[in-house]
Image: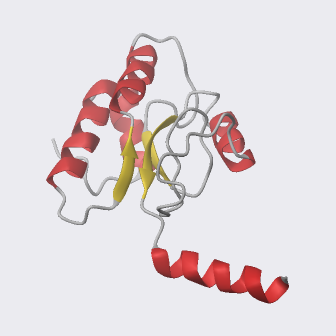
Amino acid sequence: MSIRFKTLAELKRLLENKEISSCELVNETFKNISSSKTNSFITLDEEAALNKAKDFDEGKVDGDLAGIPIAQKDLFCTKNLRTTCGSKILENFIPPYDATVVDNLSAAFREEALVALQQLFQKVLFALQLEQIQVDL
């Protein structure tokens, strides 16, 4: 079963009806990422995602969107997950804390968001932000 163009509601229904497990969903997500030619992910944490998916499948966690993997921009600090902001300067930065937006997302997912993917932060946007910072100084 392909999950590629499914909505969150469709994925939630599949999980609720046990038509797919969270582990299968995570594996399919990583399969789609690895077969993509867009190279749009910087950091992947497959092990953490699969561990959280296993917890969901075993009934240890629940929540409206629990069990569904998500991707977030590479500009949000995620504790112990490389966050580069698409910058060579930060290419090895591993934050010791979560950004507020990551905390809020985790709370919305009842502390079990499958934050395992960091999307490429587009350099055009980064350049625009740098320009804004320089103007504000």
Q: Nearer the viewer, residue 74 or 28?
A: 74
Name of the residue lying farthest toward the bottom: 135
Q: Where is residue 21 in the image (x, y as percent from the top left)?
A: 30, 25
**Is residue 21 visible to us here?**
no
84 with respect to 20 (left or right): right
Residue at 66 percent of width and 34 percent of height = 96
Q: Where is residue 75 in the image (x, y as percent from the top left)?
A: 58, 58
Residue at 49 percent of width and 81 percent of height = 124
Q: In which quarter of the image is the C terminus?
A: bottom right
- Residue 72 position (above or below residue 98): below
Q: Quadrant of residue 105?
A: top right
- Residue 127 position (above or below residue 13): below
**Is residue 29 visible to us here?**
yes
Q: Where is residue 117 in the image (x, y as percent from the top left)?
A: 42, 45
Q: Position of residue 5 (x, y in %)?
A: 28, 57
Q: Quadrant of residue 12?
A: top left
- Colour pattern of the rendering: secondary structure
Residue at 61 percent of width and 52 percent of height = 76
Q: How many marks?
A: 0
55 with respect to 39 (left or right): right
Q: Nearer the viewer, residue 32 or 127?
A: 127
8 with respect to 112 (left or right): left
Residue at 26 percent of width and 41 percent of height = 30
Q: Which of 48 and 70 is in front in this view?
A: 48
Name of the residue lying farthest toward the front: 89
Q: In which quarter of the image is the N terminus?
A: top left
46 with respect to 84 (left or right): left
